[in-house]
């Protein structure tokens, strides 16, 4: 959007992205654009507004009725910037709950049947846990965690490999960011 705007073409600005914020960059002055000659207005649907800030923020800022158009500086501290990452504690529309931690290893049996569609057979999977996201505590909570027994193959090492992957209900892989932590506890019997 920024590269197709008249501001980008007329003023010969560059568009940069840092930490999930898109903004105009002045190539001649080598700094962020802070000009009062134009404003960036955003048209965001009410449901999509909850992606950027929680409903308490919108109620405090705009009281009863949320506006259809908002100024970009209401969402971002950088002038004319647009926040593209969701705020902590807000709903992300990228993934559909529930979430699954799927494991892969040599010789393990399937322990979960997932519904695919009507008149189609269920999908067999090996899952470690089914999780839901609790918005109040900002944590993933297990809803279903079957016990699994990994085959013993008379060697000291656990197995050839043990791989974990987190996916949503549509099968899209969820990547955990660098500063987040996801612990998996293995108990040997």
Image (spheres, rainbow, N blue to C red):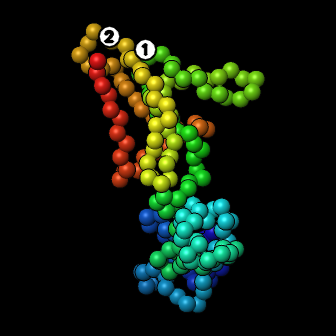
Q: Marks 1/2: CA distance?
A: 10 Å
Q: Earlier in the sequence, mark 1 or mark 2?
A: 1
Please report contact status of discs 1 and 2: CB closer than 8 Å, yes or no: yes
Determine the residue positioned at 57% across, 46% down.
95
Q: Nearer the viewer, residue 55 or 88?
A: 55
Q: Residue at x 50, y 35 (%)?
A: 143
Name the outermost residue toward the right: 119
Q: Position of residue 146 (x, y in %)?
A: 46, 25
Q: Which mark is residue 107?
A: 1
Find residue 93 and report its horizontal and vertical position in percent: 60, 53
Residue at the spot of label 2: 153
In this rendering, the answer to whether 151 lies above or below 28 is above
Q: Residue at x 60, y 86 (%)?
A: 38
Q: Secondary structure at mark 2?
A: loop
Q: Is residue 69 left or right of residue 104?
A: right
| Circle 1 SS class | loop
Q: Residues within 10 Å of mark 1 (few under 14, many from 20)?
A: few
Q: Residue furthest bottom?
A: 37
Q: Residue 29: x percent and y percent? A: 43, 85
128 sits to left or right of 73: left
Is residue 9 at all visible to an observer of this figure?
no
Q: In the depicted view, which residue is nearer to us: 174 or 184?
A: 184
Residue at the (35%, 46%) spot, across then down: 181
Q: Is residue 41 above or below residue 102?
A: below
């Amino acid at each position: 959007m920024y590269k197709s705007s008249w501001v980008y073409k007329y003023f010969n600005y560059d568009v940069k992205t840092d930490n999930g914020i898109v903004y105009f960059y002045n190539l001649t002055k080598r700094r962020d654009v802070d000009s009062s000659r134009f404003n960036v207005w955003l048209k965001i649907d009410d449901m999509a507004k909850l992606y950027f800030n929680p409903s308490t923020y919108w109620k405090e800022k705009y009281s009863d009725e949320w506006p259809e158009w908002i100024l970009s500086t209401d969402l971002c501290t950088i002038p004319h910037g647009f926040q593209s990452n969701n705020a902590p504690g807000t709903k992300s529309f990228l993934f559909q709950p529930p979430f699954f931690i799927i494991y892969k290893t040599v010789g393990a049996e399937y322990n979960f049947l997932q519904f695919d569609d009507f008149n189609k057979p269920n999908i067999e999977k090996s899952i470690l846990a089914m999780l839901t996201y609790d918005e109040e505590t900002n944590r993933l909570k297990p809803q279903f965690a079957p016990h699994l027994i990994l085959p013993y193959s008379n060697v000291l090492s656990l197995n050839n490999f043990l791989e974990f992957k987190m996916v949503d209900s549509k099968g899209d892989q969820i990547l955990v960011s660098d500063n987040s932590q996801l612990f998996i506890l293995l108990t040997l019997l």
